[in-house]
Amino acid sequence: MNWLFSIILNAVAIIAVDQLFDSIYLEGIGTAILASFILSILNVIVRPILVVLTLPITVLSLGLFLFVINAITLMITQALLGSSFEIEGFGMAILAAIILSILNLILNQLFKDAKK
């Protein structure tokens, strides 16, 4: 149940990022939920592999390289969804990954406090 709630919160964050930037195109709410679902699967399967492979760079950058890894997972998601979810350029993907991380942190904290 927590996982489903997390997917919905992430979909809300993806919709917010789509509204913030013209360089990101999202077809609709269904696409946002699907993108969130794919991102969650990639974060379980692909992200740990990328983190291990880039561990020296991540340590040297004091963890900031994790945003690049998040951007890579966003770009993979975009590639899987085709024309219904598009990000124009890797720089925009990094910026979207940063904003998504911040929004997810805020949303999770808000709803964590509301559950109590």
Image: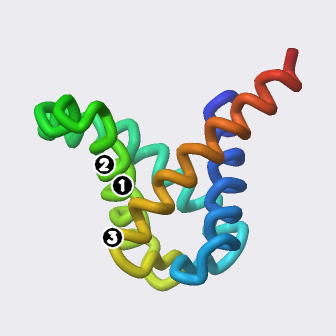
Amino acid type, callout 3 = Phe
Amino acid type, callout 2 = Ile
Q: Nearer the viewer, mark 2 or mark 1?
A: 2
Front residue of this view, candidates 77 and 116:
116
Q: Dot 3, how many residues are within 10 Å of its Cα: few (below 14), some (14-19), or many (20+)? A: some
Side of 26 where 106 appears, left or right: right
The residue labelled by disc 3 is: 90
Q: Dot 2, how many residues are within 10 Å of its Cα: few (below 14), some (14-19), or many (20+)? A: many
- Badge 1 element: helix
- Badge 2 element: helix
In the displayed structure, 28 sits above or below 54; it is below
Give the residue drawn at x 56%, y 54%. Answer: 99
Q: Nearer the viewer, mark 1 or mark 3?
A: 3
Give the residue drawn at x 70%, y 38%. Answer: 106
The percent position of residue 30, horizontal first and vertical second, equals 68, 67
Whether tag 1 and tag 3 are in contact, CB under 8 A, the answer is no
In space, the residues marked 2 and 1 are separated at their CA atoms by: 6 Å
In the displayed structure, 79 sits above or below 3; it is below
Give the residue drawn at x 64%, y 80%. Answer: 27
The residue labelled by disc 1 is: 73
Whether tag 2 and tag 1 are in contact, CB under 8 A, the answer is yes
In space, the residues marked 2 and 3 are separated at their CA atoms by: 11 Å
Amino acid type, callout 1 = Thr
Give the residue drawn at x 71%, y 55%. Answer: 12
In the displayed structure, 11 sits above or below 61; it is below
The disc at residue 69 is 2
Whether tag 2 and tag 3 are in contact, CB under 8 A, the answer is no
Decide which of tag 2 and tag 3 comes sooner along the chain: 2
User: Which quadrant holds the C terminus?
Assistant: top right
